[in-house]
Image (spheres, rainbow, N blue to C red):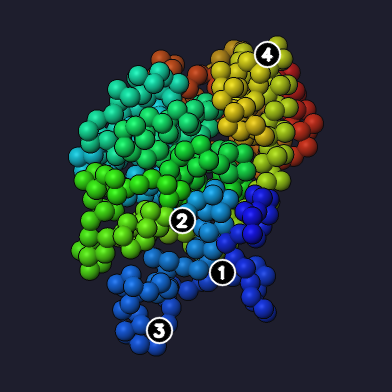
Amino acid sequence: MKEQQIATQSIHAGYRPENGQPRNIPIVQSTTFRYETSEKMGALFDLEASGYFYTRLQNPTNDQVAAKICAMEGGSAAMLTSSGQAANFYAIFNIASCGDHIVASSAIYGGTYNLFAVTMKRMGISFTFVDPDCSEETLRAAFQPNTKALFGETVANPALSVLDIERFARVAHENGVPLIVDNTFPTPVNCRPIEFGVDIVTHSTTKYMDGHANAVGGAIVDSGNFDWTKYPDKYPGLCTPDESYHGVTYTERFGLGGAFITKAVVQLMRDLGSIPAPMNSYLLNVGLETLPLRMAQHCHNGQAVAEYLAQHPKVAWVKYPGLKGDAHYELAQKYMPQGTCGVVSFGVKGGREAASRFMAGLKLASIATHVADAKTCVLHPASSTHRQLSDAELAAAGVAPDLVRFSVGIEDVRDIIADLEQALAAI
Ligand SMILES: *Cc1c(COP(=O)(O)O)cnc(C)c1O
C-alpha cells in the first residue's frame, strides 16, 4: 500500500490491534517480562532474537509510539527517550566520544547549547558553533578531521531562524558526516527533514507532539540513509564488533536502517537509562493523534498574531518566519510551505521595563517557562531565565532586553489578539 498521509499516520501508524485487542495502545506498566527458559531469554541478550525482557531497554508502549513517530518522519527506525535533552545527547554520543568534534548551529535551544558547550565538553567532545546563516565557506571551515556530525534546529528555539537544510546536508555529506536536526518546532506535520537530506532527526516531544504540557519526552529517528560503512575508521562503534554483545557488528547485523537506533538502545539506554515511562508515552500518543489539526491552528493563529503585532505602534520589532520580509521567509516557504510553528518573538518599545509591564497586563496568556502547547503562554527571558544578565550580556547571548517569546496556543485567535491589545494599551 502507498505510504499514508500524515494525518492518517498520526492516528494509525505504529500499532494495529488484532481481533479483539485493545483499540488504544495499551500502557504496559511492567518493568519485566516472563520467559519459559533461560535459553529463550539468553537469545535476547545476544541480540539473536528480538523481544522484551526489561523496560530500561525496551517496552511495547514506548516502541509502538516510537514507530508512529518514525512513520510520520519517514524514517527507518526510532526510539523514545525521557526528555528532549536525552534525545539530543544520545543522538550525538552514539557516534562521538572523547577526542571527537561536532559542528553545531549557534541558533539552538539554550538547554542544548549548555549540554554541548558545558557538559559534553567536560566529556572531551569539542564543539564549533556556526551562525546558521553563514556562508558555505565559513561552514566548511568549521570541519576538522575528527568531526563526527553537523547539528542544527529546523526552526530554532527561540531565535526562530529557519535552517537551510539542503545546504547543511550537502556540506555535512561532503565532509563524510551525518546531519542531525532537532525538528521540535515544525514537527513532521510542517517539515519532514529526511526528505531534504537530513540523516537523523531528534525531538523534544514535550512541545507540540505532546501538545498539552502533560509529559516531558524526546525521540530520535534515523533515516537509514547515512552509509556508516564508507567510514569504518570514523564510526568504529557502528562498523566494528561490540564486545559487550559477543562481537555483534551493528551495521552488519541490523543494516543501515537499524544500526544507529539499535546501538543507541542496547548500549546507551542500557547504560544510561533515560527511558520514558510507558504512561508518558501513552499521553504522547494521545497528543500525536491530533497533531496535524493542532499544528494547522497554531500556524494560523501564529501568523495572525505576528501580523497584528507587526503593525502595532507600540511594538518595536517582530520575528516570525511566516511574515513577508522576514529574513527567513524564503527558507520557510521552501521547507515549510504550510507554516512553521506558533511561536512569535517580538519587542515592545521601552525595553526591558516596558516588556515586564506588558506581560503583567496579560490576562489570557499565562507566564510560563514553556512553549508549544495548546494554551497561549509567554516568557520574558530578560526578567526570568536570563535575569542575572546585564543588557550587554543579553546581547551577546542573542536575547534582546525587550524580547518577549509568545507561544500562540489554539484558542480563538480573536481572544488572543484582544488580550495583546489590552496589555499593549496599558503600557
Ligand atoms: C525544549 C527543547 C529541547 C529540550 O527538550 P526537553 O524535553 O525539555 O528536555 C530541545 N530542543 C528544543 C528545540 C526544545 O524546544
Q: Is residue 380 above or below residue 179?
A: above
The residue at the point 58 percent across, 39 percent down is: 191
The circle on residue 225 is: none
Separation of residues labelled 3 and 1 (CA atoms): 20 Å
Q: Which structural element holds mark 1?
A: loop
Q: Disc 1 designates what residue?
A: 27
Q: Which structural element holds mark 3?
A: loop
Q: Position of residue 240 (x, y in %)?
A: 23, 56
Quarter of the image for the N terminus: give it: bottom right
**Of circles 4 and 2, which is in front?**
2
Quarter of the image for the C terminus: give it: top right
Q: Position of residue 232 (x, y in %)?
A: 24, 48
Q: Disc 4 designates what residue?
A: 314
Q: Disc 3 designates what residue?
A: 35
Q: Position of residue 61 (x, y in %)?
A: 53, 66
The circle on residue 77 is: 2
Q: Amino acid at mark 2?
A: Ala
**Of circles 4 and 3, which is in front?**
3
Q: Name the N-terminal-most of marks 1 and 4.
A: 1
Q: Name the N-terminal-most of marks 4 and 3.
A: 3
Q: Name the N-terminal-most of marks 1 and 2.
A: 1
**Does any atom of ligand 1 lie closer than 8 Å to the CB of label 4?**
no
The residue at the point 43 percent across, 25 percent down is: 132
Q: Amino acid at mark 4?
A: Lys
Name the image quarter holding residue 345.
Answer: top right
Contact, mark 1 vs mark 4 (Cβ under 8 Å): no
